[in-house]
Image: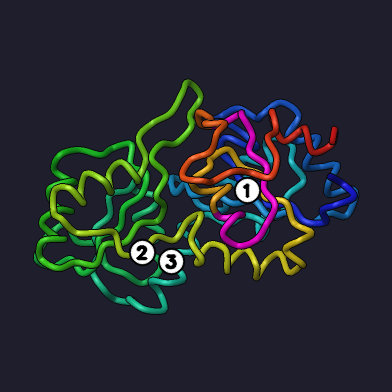
Amino acid sequence: MLGKYNGFIFDMDGTIYRGSHLIPGADKTVNQLKELGKKTIFISNKTTGSVNDYYNLMKKFGLNVAENEIINSTVVLNKYLTEHYNGNRFFAIGEQSFIDEVKSAGLVFSSSPEEIDILLVTLDRTLNYDKLEIAARALENGARFFAANIDDTCPVDNGEVLDAGSTISALQKRTHRKLELHFGKPSKFMFDEIKKRLDMDPGKVLLVGDRLETDIAMGNKFGIDTALVSTGVKLFQNGTNGIKPTYFFESVNDILKK
């Protein structure tokens, strides 16, 4: 591994840590890669915190990381919204930290369905029926239908919780509207942002993650070798819809062992 790859893209939640706990040995792996001069990027579809929040969490865990090595789907989404929808009104099925970040990108929050230009969907642990109905009525009134991420579940300390994909599915069935764009893994929007920060030959890069339909699918889509770890979401070893990794790892620590 160390001889073959000069760059490593790491999913964070489920790969480097799970919930509030570090995956044992992940700090040693990342720090040794850094000492060897390997380039690293850390990516997440999770929107419940800012990049600075994730940077502080990783530093607390003892990882030698820089803030500009971290990308989450909110960052990617906001770049697109600022360029194309500055000043528009939005409603979000998402937590307050996510809403605040979108507002900082120049959009205006509204919970009136007739005013909403864009509906944004992401992980929301405060999801309720009222939010779903505001979202559905906004879509019926012609609002654009975007998502920060499409994960069905998110790994937490004691299992998994419902994520954006489950909400998107419910809204599609409720309104007969299809999701138009999403900005996390495995989208081209996310991959383009990674390429800007990890400027190297894709053949020298390994993407490590715990989810087939986002992490591994993105690597396959853009010609990057992948490693699926078993420390995050439930694994389906035979692949999903033909999505298979280059390697199966027990954890990120296998990078130093193989």
The magenta span reads 218-232
Q: Tell me if residue 220 comes above or below residue 213 in the rendering.
A: below
Q: Residue at x 64, y 51 (%)?
A: 42
Mark 3 — residue? Answer: 78
Query: Where in the figure is residue 158, as x and y percent of width and height?
Result: 47, 20
Q: Which circle's residue, 3 or 1, is located before the other in the chain?
A: 1
Mark 1 — residue? Answer: 55
User: Disc 1 to disc 2, how far (Cα)?
Assistant: 27 Å
Q: Hey, what amino acid is under mark 1?
A: Tyr
Q: Which of these two is toward me, 92 or 211?
A: 211
Foreground label between 1 and 2: 2
Q: Which circle's residue, 1 or 2, is located before the other in the chain?
A: 1
The reply to whether residue 104 is in sight is yes
Residue 1's label in the rendered image is none
Query: Where in the figure is residue 8, as x and y percent of width and height?
Result: 74, 52
Q: Which of these two is toward me, 247 or 83?
A: 247
